[in-house]
Amino acid sequence: MDKKNTESNKPVVSIIMGSESDWLVMKAASDFLNSQQIDHECKVVSAHRTPELMLEFSKEASNRGIRVIIAGAGGAAHLPGMVASITPLPVIGVPIKSGNSIDGWDSILSILQMPNGVPVATVALNGAKNAAILALQILGASDPELQNKVVSYKNALKEEVINQLLKII
């Protein structure tokens, strides 16, 4: 699976997952980045089935202009941590409740419990959209235009909640 990015073909975020079945969850990250017009790529990179590809991807991502990696994985969920051990880029891990999962806890703990020196920012189980929001916040820390997108998004969330309250009252 090598999904799209926008017109410039210069992705700044890479969404990777251990298998194509993870796309059901990870699509939410791509959808959010599309809504914010953030160039990104989506790839299957398995830590267990294609370790050489994972190593190459991890070493070359920053050279290709990627600035943040979102890595989703289920089961043993080694992908986010292994990528984080190689790349200098921030890695956001998305634990996925997969068919072979122990209610998702195996994925959560595999991503969350990284050793000192190899951080992985970890979002909630199946929290791909939050991973994309965090990626936008990371990018926005050094780009005022992207930071304005974060502010606009948060203002829209606030308005949505206020409108919900008005409907209840």
Image (cartoon, helix red, strand yellow):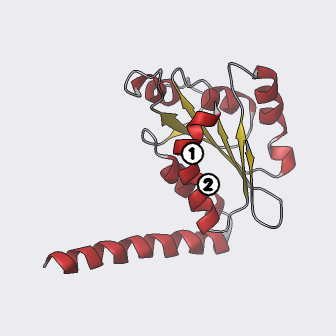
Mark 1: which secondary structure? helix
**Which residue is situated farthest in the left direction here?**
169
Q: Which residue is drawn at 74% across and 58% down?
A: 5
Dot 2 crowding, Cα within 10 Å, few <14, some 14–19, many 20+: many
The percent position of residue 73, horizontal first and vertical second, equals 57, 31
Amino acid beneath label 1: Met
Could you tell whether 73 is left or right of 127 in the image? Answer: right
Mark 2: which secondary structure? helix
Estimate the spatial distance between the alpha carbons at disc 1 and disc 2, rounded to whole Å. Answer: 7 Å
Amino acid beneath label 2: Ser
In this orientation, which residue lies closer to the viewer: 27 or 92?
A: 27
Q: Residue 131 carries which label?
A: none
The percent position of residue 92, horizontal first and vertical second, equals 58, 42
Could you tell whether 73 is left or right of 89 in the image? Answer: left
Q: Does 8 appear above or below 17? A: below
Q: Residue at x 67, y 40 (%)?
A: 16
Q: Does 168 appear above or below 1? A: below
Q: Residue 26 carries which label?
A: 1
In this orientation, which residue lies closer to the viewer: 77 or 83?
A: 77
Residue occupied by mark 2:
30
Could you tell whether 157 is left or right of 54 in the image? Answer: left
Marks 1 and 2 in Cβ contact (< 8 Å): yes
The percent position of residue 60, horizontal first and vertical second, equals 84, 38
Q: Residue at x 80, y 35 (%)?
A: 57
Q: Residue at x 86, y 45 (%)?
A: 63
The quarter in which the C terminus is drawn is bottom left
User: Which image quarter: residue 125?
Assistant: top left
Dot 1 crowding, Cα within 10 Å, few <14, some 14–19, many 20+: many
The quarter in which the N terminus is drawn is top right
